[in-house]
Image (tube, grey):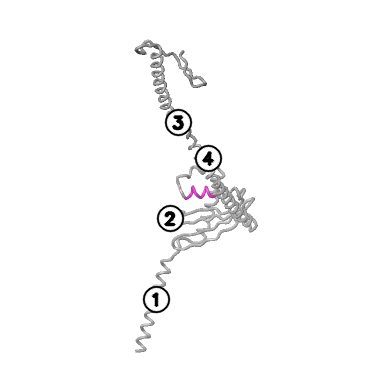
Amino acid sequence: MKKFLLVLGMITCMIGMTACGKQAEEAKPIMDEATATATAEYTVEQIAQIVSSGLSEQYAEDPVIAKALESWEKALADIGDYKQIVGSEAEIDDEQAIVNVSIQGTNHDAVVEVIMGKEAYTSITTNVTYSFGELMTKAGLNTLMGMGTVFVVLILISLIISCFNFIPKIQAKFSKKAEAPAPAPAAASVAAAAPAAEENLTDDLELVAVIAAAIAASEGAASTDGFVVRSIKRANAGKWQRA
């Protein structure tokens, strides 16, 4: 039994070693480090030459190269003039090769990350190398800008809230203006006074008839057809006079 288990263990180890050997053969890098480094450095030199010659538009149809040229042009604002390549570091596996090419500039240094696949470039990006003091300065400026923006927004919100106190006053003014056309009852009173005038006119006609009858009786006339009352004047003593 022990011999059987020993043989089984040996067979298992042999199978494991064979599998590891196959995996090692399958995980072969896509290229060696020297080839990857030389290719990446040559690519960086070509990018610098294309940008300095003003030929970037000729590569607009290639998205990877176009983005690489754009990244280089943006970084030149901090790099200054490109001087030379000072070193490279490569990481290679069976899928891709990542090479970081360090370059030197008049103002700042930079690292160009070149990622190459099995058949073509995957990405090329230029990253400027800043000092610790510059990074802290940028971080402080970003913090101040963020805090300043927050304070400005808070001030605007407080001003808007303070304006709410004037809204009831404005509404009250508009409501008073809307209630202003109220003098309409005066016209109604004038209209109501008109019937009174008609009533006074009726009383005057009756009074004229009475006066005419009295005058006819005093004159001995049978009727009042021949009399015409032109006006009636009221005396202080309450007597009536014939015009």
The residue indicated by pointer 1 is 16
Give the structural element (helix, strand or loop) at label 2.
loop
Q: Which amino acid lies under the numbered mark 1 shown in the image of this protein?
A: Gly
Secondary structure mostly seen in the magenta stretch: helix
Q: Earlier in the sequence, mark 2 or mark 3?
A: 2
The residue indicated by pointer 2 is 119
Mark 3 vs mark 1, foreground winner is: 3
What is the distance, in whole Å, between disc 2 and disc 3 at their CAs? 102 Å
Give the structural element (helix, strand or loop) at label 3.
helix
Q: Which amino acid lies under the numbered mark 2 shown in the image of this protein?
A: Glu
Mark 4 crowd level (few <14, some 14–19, many ≥20, 10 Å Cα): few
What is the distance, in whole Å, between disc 4 and disc 2 at their CAs? 78 Å
Mark 2 crowd level (few <14, some 14–19, many ≥20, 10 Å Cα): few
Residue range in magenta is 64-71
| Percent coordinates x, y for residue 241 in the rendering | 47, 16
Magenta stretch encompasses residue 67: yes
Q: Nearer the viewer, residue 86 or 132?
A: 132
Q: Is residue 11 above or below residue 113?
A: below
Mark 2 vs mark 3, foreground winner is: 3
Query: In screen coordinates, is 215 left or right of 174?
Result: left
Q: In this view, does 202 lie above or below 84?
A: above
The residue indicated by pointer 4 is 173
Q: Which amino acid lies under the numbered mark 4 shown in the image of this protein?
A: Lys
Mark 4 vs mark 2, foreground winner is: 4
